[in-house]
Amino acid sequence: NAGVTQTPKFQVLKTGQSMTLQCAQDMNHNSMYWYRQDPGMGLRLIYYSASEGTTDKGEVPNGYNVSRLNKREFSLRLESAAPSQTSVYFCASIMDPATNEKLFFGSGTQLSVL
Amino acid sequence: RKEVEQDPGPFNVPEGATVAFNCTYSNSASQSFFWYRQDCRKEPKLLMSVYSSGNEDGRFTAQLNRASQYISLLIRDSKLSDSATYLCVVEDWGYGQNFVFGPGTRLSVLP
């Protein structure tokens, strides 16, 4: 059982380049999330998808776009990377956030923008 | 704005010590509370949910005070393997279905 698979694990970009972070879960979860984590700060929500076909902005959406391709996959795209987007990115999923279940996380992507 | 705040840490304690972490949250409407553990920038993993009556899981005890909007985590008989960052997490429906993470408190258990 793979859980949440996130790729790539590491990426270095130059300012202005674009890239897509991939996330897939095999647990039939409805809700999926993209967070970023910066030193000294908690995880901050970038975008989330409450169900297949829907996406919504979180706390820090500027500079990012997302696609909920199907129930399994939720991708995060940086159209024109900036040094301020250097961070560790985590994808997460949950069946129903209204219950007391746990979030399942991917292993993270360390992104550096030069 | 800081919705979830935690003790800044780090906490350096000897093996066998008892250590307590504190967390406060700003949204009085929050209903669900959790402690997650994160090792060395790896993904966070659920340590325990926090219930209104308080709950215990082995050496770990979580308490919730809704009136003070305060959550605590007590670790007894600390082990070297408890060294990690502990994240306080609060459900917050301000951004739809979201979980707000505190900045974390780092614990180092020393031999």
Image (spheres, rainbow, N blue to C red):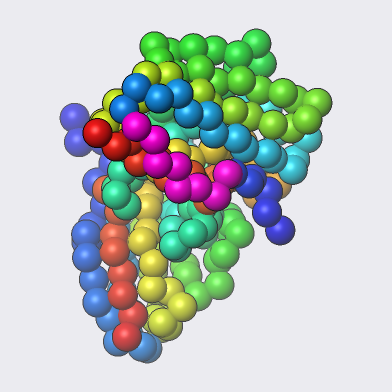
Q: Where, by quadrant of the figure, is residue A72 drawn?
A: top left
Q: Is residue A75 left or right of residue B23?
A: left
Residue A97 visible in the displayed image: no
**Which range is magenta?**
B7-14
**Residue at screen point 45% across, 23% down:** B18
Does residue B61 sit above or below A114 in this rendering?
A: above
Is residue B52 or residue A104 the one in the foreground?
A: B52
Q: Quarter of the image containing the C terminus of chain B?
A: top left
**Residue at screen point 29% across, 60% down:** A109
Is residue B15 or residue B83 the one in the foreground?
A: B15
x, y percent for residue A66: 44, 62
Q: Is residue B41 left or right of residue B91?
A: left
x, y percent for residue B110: 29, 37
User: How many circles with numbers are drawn on the protein?
Assistant: 0
x, y percent for residue A34: 44, 54
**Residue at screen point 58% across, 44% down:** B7
Is residue A91 or residue A67 the one in the foreground?
A: A91
Residue B111 visible in the displayed image: yes
Q: Quarter of the image containing the N terminus of chain B?
A: bottom right
**Residue at screen point 35% across, 41% down:** B108
Residue A61 is one of the magenta-drawn residues? no
Is residue B86 or residue B93 the one in the foreground?
A: B86
Does residue A65 sit above or below B7 in this rendering?
A: below
